[in-house]
Structures are given as C-alpha cells and as structure tokens.
Amino acid sequence: MPARKKPLVVVTRKLPDVVETRMRELFDTRLNVTDAPLSQAELVAAVREADVLVPTITDEIDAAVLAQAGERLKLVANFGNGVDNIDVGAALSRGITVTNTPGVLTEDTADMTMALILAVARRVAEGARVIPEERFEGWSPTWMLGHRITGKRLGIIGMGRIGTALARRAKAFGLSIHYHNRRRVPAALEEELEATWWDSLDQMLARMDVVSVNCPHTPATYHLLSARHLRLLRPEAIVVNTARGEIIDENAMARLIEQGAIAGAGLDVFEHEPAVNPRLIKLARQGKVVLLPHMGSATHEGRVDMGEKVIVNIRTFMDGHRPPDRVLPSML
C-alpha cells in the first residue's frame, strides 16, 4: 500500500528551528526563511494551494482572503493565542477549521505584565537610561522617586488564565486584587487570591491604583477603555496593557496622561501595530510611559511550546479527529 501523501503546510513567518525541523519531518512544509511578513497577494496564493495554513497574529486572514481559498484548505492553525486576525465565522462557513495555541503563554505574559507594573511605578526604564547617558551624579534623597506598589489596589480586566496568573504574582508583591470579568471566578479562587469582583467596570476603575488589561480583543472589547472609562481613573493611577492595543483608546489615554489626569502607562501592545502613536513615544521620552515592542510572550520556551501546540492540532486534524484547540465563533 502506498504511503499516505503528507499535507502541504504553509507557514507564514519564521518559527523556532526545532519547530520548523519537526514540521518538515511530519508534513510537506513550506517555510518562510526570510521572516518577512507575507503580502496580501502572497497570503492569497498560500490559501489557494495549502492543505493547512499556519499564520501568526500579524497575518490578516479575513473573509476576502478566505473567499479565495482552494478546496484543499481545511485547517488554519494559528501560531498565537488570539484569533482576532482570523475571520473565524467566514472560515467555518467554508468548512475550514481554526485552531490556536492557548495556555502556553500564560506565565510569560503574566511575568511581563508584572514587570511593566514595576517599571512604571518605580521608573525603571527611565532610570536605566541615566548611566548610559552619563547623567548619574550620585544618590540624592529626592531624585528619581517612584511609588511603592505594596498596599496598592490592582484592577484586572479579564480574569482568565493570564489575569489569574498576574493576580498570584501581584498578591505576592502585596497588592490588593480586584477584577472585572464577564463571569465571577469560582469562590475557591477568589478566596485564594483574596480577590474582589466588580460587576461594574466603572466602579472598579474609579478606585484602582493600577489597572491591567488582560482580556481578549473582540468586537465587544474594542476601546473597552474608552475616553469615558479612562476619565474615571484617579490621577495617581497607571494603566498596563499586555493583551491587545485595540482595547484602549490610545489617543484618549495619551491626552489624559499629558494633562496629568492619569499618572502613566506601561504598554506592550499598540492600537495600530507596528506603528506606535507619536504621542506615546513623546511621553516615553518624558518618562511617563514605558513602551515595549510586543515582547510579553517572547521566551524561547513559550515559542517552542506554541509550535508544539500547532503540530498537535495539525496531526490530530489530519488523523480525522477534532483538534484540541479548535476555535468556534461562539467562543469569541
């Protein structure tokens, strides 16, 4: 009996070597060795001939692209936790399964969120520039003063895996944990974290010292932190976002920081990536915000774990079973 033909898997960006090697062993894999993002025309060419497309969060797999998919394309295995780059409904209507890579980035992203909280409150990024720029003239009692985080209130928007992991870290630092979520978490978890649930986002925001955005980007969360919501924050409050840039109205936030109505922000994601709002860059130069280049999940271990999830989803699907990380429109 002849060997079963391997599926053609098209990967849109460069992945860790160990992941690419394993993919080449298992599938007929077409890699992107240059790591340059594919153009719209290249994405269309890929979906026309692939059995499986492996995009990343920077690839827009919208209805227009999916409409040109060939009959062979049956799986879009996203290399990423979010799927806001994919029109899941359009895929489903064409009989195309969509998967993602949940869970494996939780600890890394929570680490970076906690790091941003500390960086903004204690002026870490601003201080790190002083010595390389040869501006350090010795210790002074009133120089480079930040704010203590112990005893402060942290409001977490989105108490999923990452929000919960952040809460555990923040509790260890002595922060009081508060959260707003679509559903209240189990009582045992609330007790463990000594967490307070707010069904009203407005009421929570008005009382927090730190607000962390940890919810997914969906149509319902677009500009969830709108100008109105941001104006509810106390002047001493800081905002941290390691989720998706579109959840915050960046112009409104920048304006309020410029006015002193919000103390500062720590951002790893931006509303129009890879472009960054010039007002935010100016505020970063002034030491009022900390900007990172979307590196919250950027660990060697995390990227390899993501690749392994992609491989498991492809193999399971090709074996005729439901992949473990299938995404449906009802889940979004």
Image: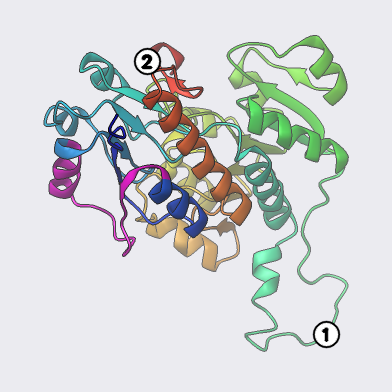
User: Which residue was labeled with disc 1?
Assistant: 138
Q: Given the image, on which type of amino acid does mark 2 rest?
A: Pro
Residue 187 is labelled as: none
Place of residue 121 in the rendered image (x, y in percent of width and height, measured from the top left): 73, 53
| Residue 260 appears in the rendering | no
Q: As drawn, which residue projects farthest toward the front?
A: 1
What range of the chain is rendered magenta?
Answer: 26-47
Place of residue 67 in the rendered image (x, y in percent of width and height, measured from the top left): 13, 27
Q: Tell me the residue at 40%/31% (across/down).
A: 83
User: Is 332 within the magenta?
Assistant: no
Element carrying mark 2:
helix
Residue 329 is labelled as: 2
Q: Tell me the residue at 75%/11% (across/down).
A: 186
Depth check, front residue: 203 or 36: 36
C-alpha distance separating marks 2 and 1: 58 Å
On screen, residue 318 versus residue 305, left or right, reads: left
Q: Tell me the residue at 65%/28% (across/down).
A: 161
Element carrying mark 1:
loop
Figure check: 80 above or below 148: above
> Mark 2 or 1, which is nearer the eye?
2
Q: Quadrant of residue 146?
A: bottom right
